[in-house]
């Protein structure tokens, strides 16, 4: 689906996200049908299943916002007892998922993830 050059640039984009935002512990790019494209992480998370779940939750968000006539779902934020996970569309074909275990890092995670998604979108468009 993606050329080796694009895959390498996706990986570089995720590495840059982790380098530029200390609270980010892991990030991945997945296709909208749930296949892992690439991932980067500081810890040891089981991210393969997260790729599938991330795409499912974005699809659910798209359905909800469509039903409510609220436009396109840009991102979904899951605030949890032990951290935060953000799911966002890069484009119609791929999704960015990023996570942190720092509960007070929502703003940084969201800001840096949005920039990363925008940069990755420019690669594939």
Image (cartoon, grey):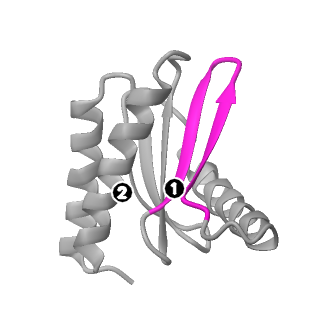
Which image quadrant: the C terminus?
Answer: bottom left
Residue at 20% across, 62% down: 9
Give the farthest residue toward the bottom.
1
To which quarter of the image does residue 64 belong? bottom right
- Between 59 and 42, the one lying in front of the other is 59
| Above or below for 104 versus 61 | above
Residue at 21% across, 63% down: 8
Q: Is residue 21 visible?
A: yes
Residue range (magenta): 73-89
Side of 111 relative to 13 (left or right): right
Would residue 119 be counted in the magenta stretch? no
Question: Quick one: SS at disc 2?
Answer: helix
Mark 2 touches mark 1? (CB < 8 Å) = yes
| Above or below for 1 versus 56 | below
Query: Which residue matches tag 1?
Result: 88
Residue 25 x/y as whole percent: 42, 29
Question: Which badge, 2 or 1, comes first in the chain's sequence?
Answer: 1
Q: Is residue 40 visible?
A: no
Q: Which mark is residue 117?
A: 2
Residue at 33% across, 39% down: 112
SS majority, magenta: strand
């Amino acid at each position: 689906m993606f050329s080796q050059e694009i895959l390498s640039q996706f990986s570089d984009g995720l590495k840059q996200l982790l380098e530029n935002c200390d609270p980010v512990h892991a990030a991945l790019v997945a296709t909208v049908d749930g296949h892992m494209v690439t991932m980067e992480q500081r810890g040891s998370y089981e991210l393969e299943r997260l790729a599938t779940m991330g795409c499912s939750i974005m699809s659910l968000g798209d359905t909800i916002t469509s039903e409510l006539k609220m436009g396109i779902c840009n991102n979904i934020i899951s605030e949890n007892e032990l951290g935060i996970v953000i799911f966002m569309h890069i484009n119609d074909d791929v999704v960015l998922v990023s996570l942190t275990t720092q509960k007070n890092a929502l703003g940084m995670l969201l800001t840096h993830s949005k920039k990363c998604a925008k940069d990755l979108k420019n690669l594939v468009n």
